[in-house]
Each structure stands twice: as C-alpha cells, then as structure tokens.
Image (spheres, helix red, strand yellow):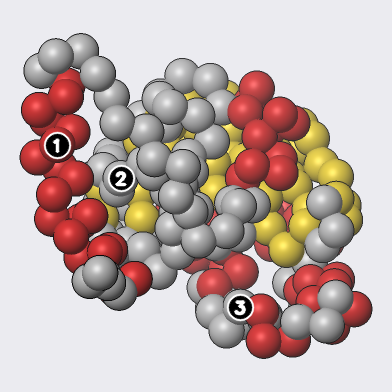
Amino acid sequence: MGKITVSLYRQLRNVLAPSLERLFARHGFKIVSTYRDYPSETSKCRDRLAPFCIGFGLDLGFGGDPINESAIRVDMPKPYARTGSYSVQLGGDATRLVWFADGVLDYIYSSHLLEDFVDTRSVLVEWLRVLKPGGRLIIFCPDQVAYEAYNLREGHPERMNPHHVHADFSLNKLRNIIVNIGGTKELHAIDLVDEYSWELVMEKI
C-alpha cells in the first residue's frame, strides 16, 4: 500500500480545499475540519473574552481559530501555526493595519501575538488608531516568566516560542505602556490565568 507523507498531505489539502469548499457551498454545506497542530490559546479564554468582541472587529494572528465567526481574520499569508480550520481573510502585517481608516472598528482581539514585536508601544498605538471611541482592545498574552517556568516544569523546554522577544513581558508591563499612551480606560483584567497567561480589556475614550 502506498503512503503519503505529512508534508505532501498538507500540500494536497491546501490545493484541493478551496475548490471543495466552493463546490459544497453551492449545495448549502460547509466543510469543517478538526485538524489542528495543537489547541489554540484562544480556546482557553473564549468564554471570558468573546463577550467583549461585539460589532465589527479583527482577530489579529488568529492562527486558524478566531475568537468568533464574525471577526475579520488577520494573519500572515502563511501562518506558522494551524490551530483550527478557518482561513486567513487579510494576509499581512499586524503592526500596520493599512486596510483600515482611523476610528472605524468596534474591537480588536489578539491572542499571544503582541509579545512577538519589539516595539510594543508603536503596535498598540496602531491598534488603537483604528478603534472607534468606545471601541475595545482585547488582549490575551503570556507572562514570559510564568511561560518559561511552565515549560520547564512540564519538562518541555523545546516548546518555548522563539518569536517571544521580551524577557519581562507581563500584564503590568503592558498596563504601563497603555497608560503612557493615554486615551483608554480599563474594563477587565486577570493576571496569571490558564497556567501562564494574562488578559486585559481596554476601552478607547
């Protein structure tokens, strides 16, 4: 019996899936895949944070598993992680939301992405730019110290994400940056939840 390697299977899936989806959609069906590299971080916080994602908004760096079905899905054209079956709608740079004018969105949600950027402040300024007054910035991120300790405790140091660029990334660090930027008020926060993460919801004034 012949065998198909994992890489060949993924290439075939990427080529054939769009055509099959269109064919089934014409007959009122939607293909839903359960394949994923690993469970998304969003799956851990969805019950708590999805209620803040109301209206028209973005899920930045969603990795295949958006916070809800109506969020505009933004990621790299070819995401490095696959944590669900949803495809990228806007492929590009999450630090420059060139598709959107100032003050047009009701929310931005992002999970385990902000820690990958060196200039955290400039990224937050850009995300806040596209929010309406009253719009919400919903962030779920790792506490880097807790994240490293968790992986070491579990005996999996190889699972450390090499894209994290801040040794001190934390809720307090981000709070200080946002306060310095100004123009927001805090609606919700939890520190060290789901083993090594924190969450923060800010409203643009």
**Mark 1, residue position:** 20
Residue under label 3, please give it.
Answer: 161
Give the position of the C terminus as an image quadrant: top right
The amino acid type found where label 3 is placed reads Asn
Kindly report which numbered mark, 1 or 3, lies closer to the viewer in this rendering. 1
Q: Amino acid at mark 1?
A: Leu
Q: Image quadrant for the N terminus?
A: bottom left
Q: Dot 3 surroundings within 10 Å: few (below 14), some, or many (20 or more)? A: few
Measure how far apart labels 2 and 1 are at the Cα level. Answer: 14 Å
Which sits earlier in the primary sequence, circle 2 or circle 3? 2
Residue beneath the point at 67% across and 86% down: 158
What is the distance, in whole Å, between disc 1 and disc 3 at their CAs?
Answer: 34 Å
Three-letter residue code for mark 2:
Ser
Name the element at disc 2: loop
Residue 172 found in image quarter: bottom right
Q: Which residue is mark 2?
A: 87
Residue 136, percent across and down? 58, 33
How many C-alpha atoms fall within 10 Å of the one at disc 1: few (<14), some, or many (≥20)? few
User: At 79% across and 66% down in the image, what residue appears?
Assistant: 143
Mark 2 / mark 1, whichever is N-terminal: 1
